[in-house]
Structures are given as C-alpha cells and as structure tokens.
Amino acid sequence: QVQLVESGGGLVQPGGSLRLSCAASGSIFTFSAMGWYRQAPGNQRELVATITHYGTPGYADSVKGRFTISKHNANNTMYLQMNNLKPEDTAVYYCFGRVVGVTTYDHWGQGTQVTVSS
C-alpha cells in the first residue's frame, strides 16, 4: 500500500507563493495519474490540477496561469507550485494517486493547510 504525504502548506500573504510536495512511499510510476484536490470549509471538494503518467498536466480554470503541477518519478514526488495566491485559494490541499487496473482506486494523502491572508 503506497502512502502519500503532503508538505509545504502554510500561511502566505496574497500575491505570495508556496510549493506543495506529495511524497510517495513507493513508486509513483505505477500511477496512471496524480493530482491535487482542495476543500475549504463549507465548500465542496474541488479538483485543482492533475498530471498523467506521461506528464500531461490539467488545471481548473480558477488556477490556470498561477499553479503548475509537476512530478519527479525518480524521487517519487509530485509538486504543486502555487504563485499569485489569492484568499480564495485558502483550503486544505490533498494529493492523490490513481491506480487503474482490474479495479480503479485512489491513494490519498492526509492533507496540508494553505491559508492566504494579509
């Protein structure tokens, strides 16, 4: 069972940057896709960004041009570079890794808090 651990969250002022990391206990090469969700209090979970096995990224409209998703297979780590942060980006960010086979299931991290406030 691969475990995912997020890090890099914190408090940042509007316009600032943070880089989130999602470190896997095993090889991320086996994931068909990875990505980041976020959830703010009282809001539904929102898919923020995804990256395929081959490295093709995808973004929610709300973060396009500000966030960049990437992964480093050799380090078994995925990243989310977040620039020009806004107060509405405040949420708990969760990473996931999707396995597609006979069954499809997701591995999840425990979440990391991102707070954008002056």
Image (spheres, rainbow, N blue to C red):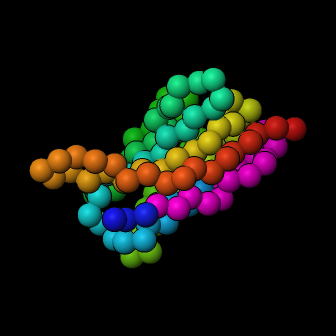
Count up the numbered dots.
0
Q: Is residue 21 left or right of residue 53?
A: right
Q: Quadrant of the C terminus?
A: top right
The residue shown at (22%, 46%) is 104
Residue 81 in view (yes/no): no
In the picture, residue 43 is in which quadrant?
top right
The stretch drawn in magenta includes residue 116: no
Q: Does residue 20 lie above or below 83 as drawn?
A: below
Q: Is residue 2 left or right of residue 10?
A: left
Residue found farthest to the right: 118
Residue found farthest to the left: 102
> Residue 10: x percent and y percent?
74, 52
Q: Does residue 86 lie above or below 75 as drawn?
A: above
Residue 75 in view (yes/no): yes
Q: Quadrant of the N terminus?
A: bottom left
The residue shown at (60%, 56%) is 20
The stretch drawn in magenta includes residue 15: yes
Q: Which residues are magenta?
A: 4-19
Residue found farthest to the front: 1
> Residue 31: x percent and y percent?
29, 58
| 50 and 39: which is toward the camera | 39
> Residue 73: x percent and y percent?
37, 70
In the picture, residue 84 is in which quadrant?
top right
The residue shown at (38%, 53%) is 107
